[in-house]
Amino acid sequence: MDSKRVIQLRARIVLGFGIVTSLAAPRALAQAPQVTNKAATYDVAIEHDKAVVVRDGTKLAVDLYRPAGALVKQGSRFPTLLTRTPYNKRGAEREGWYYAQRGYVVVANDVRGRYASEGSWRMMADDPADGYDVVEWIAAQPWSNGKIGTFGTSYPGGTQHALAELRPPHLTTLIPIDALANCGVSGMRHGGAFELRFMNWIFQTGAPNSRAALANPALRDALIENGRRIREHVDSLPLRAGLSPLKVAPEYEAWLVEALRSGPEAPLWHARGMSVVDHVDKYADVPVLHVTGWYDSWTRQTVLSYQALSRAKKSPQRLVIGPWVHGSQESNVAGEVEFSRDAAINLLAFRLRWYDRWMGETTGVAGDDPPVLIYVMGSGDDRKSPAGRLLHGGRWRAEREWPLARTRPTAFYLHSDGRLAREPQTEPAFATTYTYDPAHPVPTIGGNISSNQGLITNGGYDQRAREDTHAAQNRLPLAERRDVLVFRTEPLENEVEVTGTVEARLFVSSDAPDTDFTVKLIEEIPPNPDYPLGFALNLGDSILRMRYREGLDHQARPLTPGEIVEAVVTLYPTSNVFKKGSRIRVDVSSSNYPRFDRNPNTGEALGDFRRMQPAQNTLHHDAGHLSRVIFPIIPGGGN
């Protein structure tokens, strides 16, 4: 057979669920994120709690780590790396020593109102101006060469974005990892619902480490003990100012009450420091390395930041996404799931390569790296690792853009018999009604979560309740619940790669003035000797509070009971190869708790309800209402 005929045949591969696709251009496998292995050269001089006076007279505390020793000549100037953190600047000692030994000054700064810094804490509100002032203070120091980069994960990633939105003249580059950003879209207020991990942050991290608590050991001990009761606190919502133990840390209580009562359209979520996408025009035009993980709480928000800045800025923007949970770039484990060894990276040396390219000696070629580097999950055999985890595996792959240009958005329809199928349903009239009772919500089992200690777990898990699963009434798989609608493909005849953002378009109705709809993406891994019952691996989930069905930037509008409306639920991005023999599964419900706060179904004001009532929620999936999930499928398995 001639080569032309072979290519024609290969270009009409029919996948096991009926998709016809064309062969993609081959993609060479990429290396894991590259690093710079530079030996330590300098001694380190450390200065703690130096005061930086910002524009309103507040004194912010910094620790300095500077290159020292015989190699440092009088008058030497160095590039500087800054991190601004609410978690105690002493926690940056590892980075301080490492980078100072390699020719960088490191400045670690307690944000306003935290630890040794004066002032009153307000979530991100003061970080744009404070960050600008600290950057320019650094540039004026005799040991600074005027080049300033930033680092930090999570909240400290958000402080980098915040200061970049004021364009400090000496800001040179940023590496925001798992960074707080775009908080009204998801991350804090998510599809209109509230992510309760930030209530957990206030109770277990914020208030117990407030300046008042640190100055009063008895108060701190009481707040720590109070934080351990976080499951009781979330069960007892709403929170009212002055009526919770947080009244002794009023700035923390005030922020939480405001956040719980502010819908996604509220100014709180669009202010500088809380949203990159709202302030792209003000953002510094400097190289930014965006880093996150498929199981991180900030995955979607990081991708949104990368996309917005890539379109608007001339300076290089790079995106790296691994198979990580929040802040776990140096691990190859996410919950019960284990990936290839190269999924874990040397984060210090990884960042050093980028800094050397843009601030110091050009020992790497970070500026010439591909725009996007992703870890495609799913090349393992799904047996049990020596540590007892699911060996799901995966591989790194370089890409030119996000979303991938060769993506084929493919609709799968939700059928009345529970099938998830390529062909549309033909039933002239069919609907499935279930009872969503906020007193008995569907429990959270893993997912894109951080600040989860003591409340929930994060990462990939078999979707069945455990002994410590909050809100679980039994230890059965979630698929057995009456309020979880399960839709799944037939066992796949060929592997299928899904890489990108999954979107569900559901036709729904309710007898309540407001309710929620949730969607979860799962790979149903078939039974094997290590997992004789199989393994239902969660890959992503999301929620839509129906009062915001017309858009998160629109004013809330109640439902008309019984009216059929479309609910568009946007899941987090993912990249996974569904193997031959597995099933693609989608679960539809109305709660995922305590990942998201419960909708009381009463239509009362956000965060200020007094009643909860069951709702009869209906999914319409007939020929006139084509409820479907749109998957970003990569032709040819993504090779």
Image: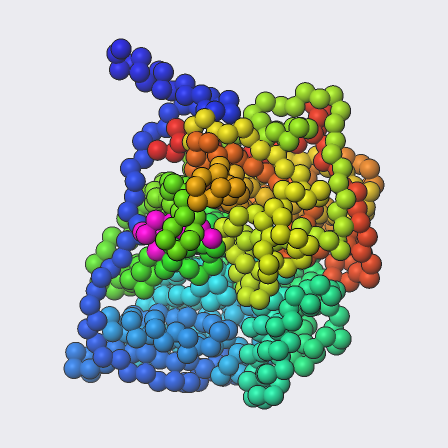
The answer, for residue 122, to whether it is visible in the render is no
Q: Identify the image quadrant of residue 46.
A: bottom left
**Residue at (26% x, 62% y) in the render:** 356
Most extreme residue toward the left is: 70
Q: Is residue 499 magenta?
A: no
Q: 343 or 284, which is in the foreground?
A: 343
The answer, for residue 115, to whether it is visible in the render is yes
Q: Identify the image quadrant of residue 428.
A: top right
**Residue at (35% x, 80% y) in the render:** 64
Q: How many marks?
A: 0
The quadrant of the rendering that contains the C terminus is top left
Range of magenta residues: 336-344
**Residue at (36% x, 16% y) in the render:** 9
The quadrant of the rendering that contains the N terminus is top left
Most extreme residue toward the top is: 1
Residue 183 spot, x, y in % from top left: 58, 57
Residue 83 spot, x, y in % from top left: 41, 70
Looking at the image, residue 127 lies above or below residue 537? below
